[in-house]
């Protein structure tokens, strides 16, 4: 079951400029920066109430974020929901006819296991499932 809006992922060209902009906009500094080598992405996280904003910048022309930004302007890349049991949620969504982009959960940023739901099966929105790793 989806338990919480975990974060909004925003694709950006210039991570430093976007970090400065969101620091001013939100009136606070980010709580974390992280490089995710498996996704060729650098991330910056801001806490906003019970949810987060994740800024994402590709570190390679082949990264999903770089490819996204070739086709679309900067902005919302994905919506992430927290789940208690990512494997059970993947099974449930697959049975409901959703297309999953990965068959097994994988390590993501911010100490999470993640799985993505294809936008074609989710009303045009890339959906990320997140489960905290102890």
Image (tube, rainbow, N blue to C red):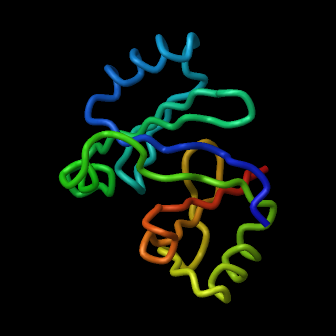
Query: Horizontal placement of 44 versus 49: left or right?
Result: left
For the residue pair 56 and 95, the one nearer the viewer reads as 95
Image quadrant in which the N terminus is located:
bottom right
The residue sitting at the front extreme is 123
Residue 100, how many percent across, how many down?
53, 77
- Numbered disc total: 0
Q: Residue 28, located in which quarter of the rendered image?
A: top right
Q: Residue at x 43, y 66 (%)?
A: 124
Q: Position of residue 26 (x, y in %)?
A: 55, 17
Relative horizontal placement of residue 49, taking residue 73 as reference (left or right) = right
Q: Is residue 26 above or below residue 79?
A: above
Q: Is residue 92 left or right of residue 25?
A: right
Percent position (x, y) of residue 86? 72, 68
Q: Residue at x 55, y 31 (%)?
A: 45
**Residue under the point 51% across and 81% down:** 99
Residue 50 rendering spot, x and y as whole percentages: 74, 34
Look at 37% across and 41% down and name the residue there: 75
């Amino acid at each position: 079951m989806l338990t919480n809006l975990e974060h909004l992922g925003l694709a950006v060209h210039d991570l430093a400029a976007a970090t400065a902009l969101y620091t001013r906009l939100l009136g606070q500094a980010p709580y974390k920066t992280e490089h995710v080598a498996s996704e060729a992405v650098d991330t910056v996280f801001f806490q906003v109430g019970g949810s987060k904003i994740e800024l994402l910048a590709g570190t390679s022309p082949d990264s999903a974020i770089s490819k996204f930004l070739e086709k679309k302007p900067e902005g919302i890349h994905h919506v992430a929901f927290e789940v208690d049991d990512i494997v059970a949620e993947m099974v449930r969504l697959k049975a409901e006819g959703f297309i999953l982009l990965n068959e097994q959960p994988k390590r993501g940023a911010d100490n999470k296991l993640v799985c993505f739901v294809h936008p074609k099966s989710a009303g045009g929105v890339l959906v990320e499932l997140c489960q905290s790793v102890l």
